[in-house]
Amino acid sequence: MSGKGTSSRAYDMIMKLLLVGDSGVGKSCLLLRFVEDKFNPSFITTIGIDFKIRTIESKGKRIKLQVWDTAGQERFRTITTAYYRGAMGIVLIYDVTDSRSFENVENWFQTVTQHANEDAQIFLVGNKCDDEVNRQVSKAQGQELAAKLNVPFLEASAKSNENVDSIFYELASIIQEKHVEENIGGVGGASGAGGIDVSQNNSGAKNNCCYRSLFVLLYLLDYILP
């Protein structure tokens, strides 16, 4: 993961990405695989919000991806929707071994379009594609739904590491292409929906971290206390 911000500028821009979808579809496992190249099959359900950071290179730019992992349970919906604001990319995830999570994709899509920036890029992902024995949703069904929603699509597996990097690299590339005319990577350039200017990184990251800690604490207390 990238180090602290310095005057030498270790990256050219920040992109805030969100992972959304039903509880248990593997959002946290995909994030852990992408950032730390680890897989934990007994991952604890996310309470509220968490995020991890990885810096990648795309189209000649070093991009700091700030990837937010959101809880899928309905009880956390209020806190997670607050984090749609400012997100440049939304990874909408379902579990190919759970048809109900696939059926809920369109509900999630409506939530995203309601709360996210108008130009936020949505990316549909069918996770756990390594488990063919228990598959309930075909790849063709995923492709058909992606075409209906007019979003890019990939099947992936956090367990086997299939297409995990591709999700985030392709999403970052699409965001760059959508906003290339805004010159978002230039020194002193606009910090619109296509990326955050590096001059804002330190304060923004600190604020995000503080908000995350506060929200997680509040919802942890709510989760534990009757």
Image: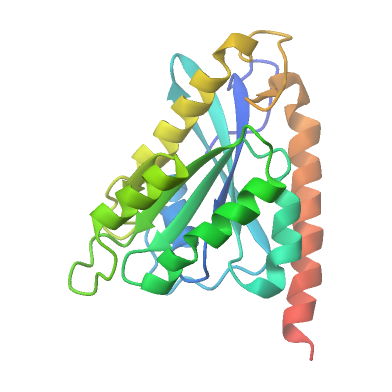
Instruction: Give the left or right position of residue 109, taking residue 24 as reference.
Output: right
- What is the residue that sits farthest to the left in this orientation? 133
Asked whether 99 or 27 is in front, the reply is 99
Can see residue 183?
A: no
Asked whether 77 or 205 is in front, the reply is 77
Q: Residue at x 62, y 50 (%)?
A: 112
Residue 117's x, y, as percent? Answer: 69, 38
Q: Residue at x 70, y 21 (%)?
A: 198
Classify residue 208 by image quadrant: top right
- What is the residue that sits farthest to the front in this orientation? 148
The vertical placement of 7 against 3, above or below, is above
The vertical placement of 184 against 169, above or below, is above
Asked whether 102 or 34 is in front, the reply is 102
Residue 158's x, y, as percent? Answer: 35, 57
- What is the residue that sits farthest to the bottom in this orientation? 226
Can see residue 213?
A: yes
Instruction: Give the left or right position of residue 96, taking residue 113 as reference.
Output: left
Q: Residue at x 59, y 10 (%)?
A: 181
Residue 10's x, y, as percent? Answer: 58, 22
The vertical placement of 181 against 150, above or below, is above
Count of numbered labels shown in the rendering: 0
Residue 52's x, y, as percent? Answer: 57, 48
User: Quadrant where the C terminus lies?
Assistant: bottom right
Q: Residue at x 69, y 49 (%)?
A: 114
